[in-house]
Image: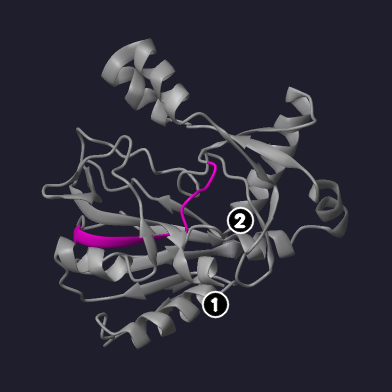
Amino acid sequence: FFFFKQKTAYEIRNCDWSSDVCSSDLYHLLMRHLVIVFPGQRLTPAAQLDFAQRFGELDAPHHVYPHVPGHERVVLLENDGSRPPNTDVWHSDLTFKEDPPFASVLYAKVVPETGGDTLWASMYAAYDALPAGMKSDIATLSAVHAMGSYWNEYHAAGGSDAIREAMRRLGAAVHPVVGTHPVTGRAFLYVNRHFTTHVLGMTSAESQRLLAYLFDHIEQPDFQVRLRWRPGTVAMWDNRVTMHYAVADYLPQYRCMNRITVVRDTRTAAA
């Protein structure tokens, strides 16, 4: 594990995942540290599902990625020389949806001999480090989030008709540039290079300049933590206030991960 100046992630060992008390403690650690990591696990898809659903409602099957056979809510992420990833860009998951997901649980099944790390960035830290004038300028702005490179998958599968159908079904979303976390009440930046396309109320040129500034600011190493995966490592993160980047420096080696997305935080809903 490698920590940078903003220590965000937290490593946990010898935790009883079946315990509701443990799940509550882990939730509070997640709220505090944003990324929690469990090394040396042996998880079946059923066990991973049982753990994830303790934190909230699980996502429907992914609109593009395949799933583990027999477990449609467990996304199968397999990449190698013939199947390069599209996650080697800074992003928060699925922000083109009106209600983006709360958290993800990612389990490393097969990792390359070298490379394939994942980085996360704290959007709290990125916001806190902005100049006061910039915070004031963006306080009331909103931005459009669209599907980014997922358009490529739809076009490859069905051409323009598939893109039109995806746009009809999934569309785009508008989110505040500065969000407020529903649990902690802290402010955070909510734009990402993969999905955020336009700041409303600005010309295209103005929007592009502002987004370029914010993207460059967010992606500074000062706000990041980096995980070197080992087989059996599990990472869980709060998707609302982090971005992540899956480094694709291992190709053509093989990398296989199982991912579950928690779309709604039941503890927040209950509160």
Q: Is residue 103 magenta?
A: yes
* Percent position of residue 73, x then y: 25, 51
Q: Is residue 121 magenta?
A: no
User: Image quarter for residue 162?
Assistant: top left
Q: Secondary structure at mark 1?
A: helix
Asked whether residue 233 appears in the rendered view, the answer is yes
Q: As rendered, which of 53 and 33 lies closer to the eye? A: 53
* Percent position of residue 28, x then y: 49, 80
Taking the spot 73% from the left edge, 65% from the top edge, the residue there is 128
Assess disc 1: are there few (<14), some (14-19) or many (≥20) residues with their C-alpha within 10 Å of its C-alpha: some
View extreme (top): residue: 160
Given the image, on which type of amino acid does mark 2 rest? Gln
Determine which residue is flagged by label 1: 32
User: In the rendered structure, which disc, 1 or 2, sits on the residue that comes first in sequence?
Assistant: 1
User: Image quarter for residue 56?
Assistant: bottom left
Given the image, on which type of amino acid does mark 1 rest? Arg
Query: Which residues fall within the magenta stretch?
Result: 98-110
In three-dimensional space, the C-alpha distance between marks 1 and 2, rounded to whole angstroms, equals 21 Å
* Percent position of residue 159, x then y: 33, 13
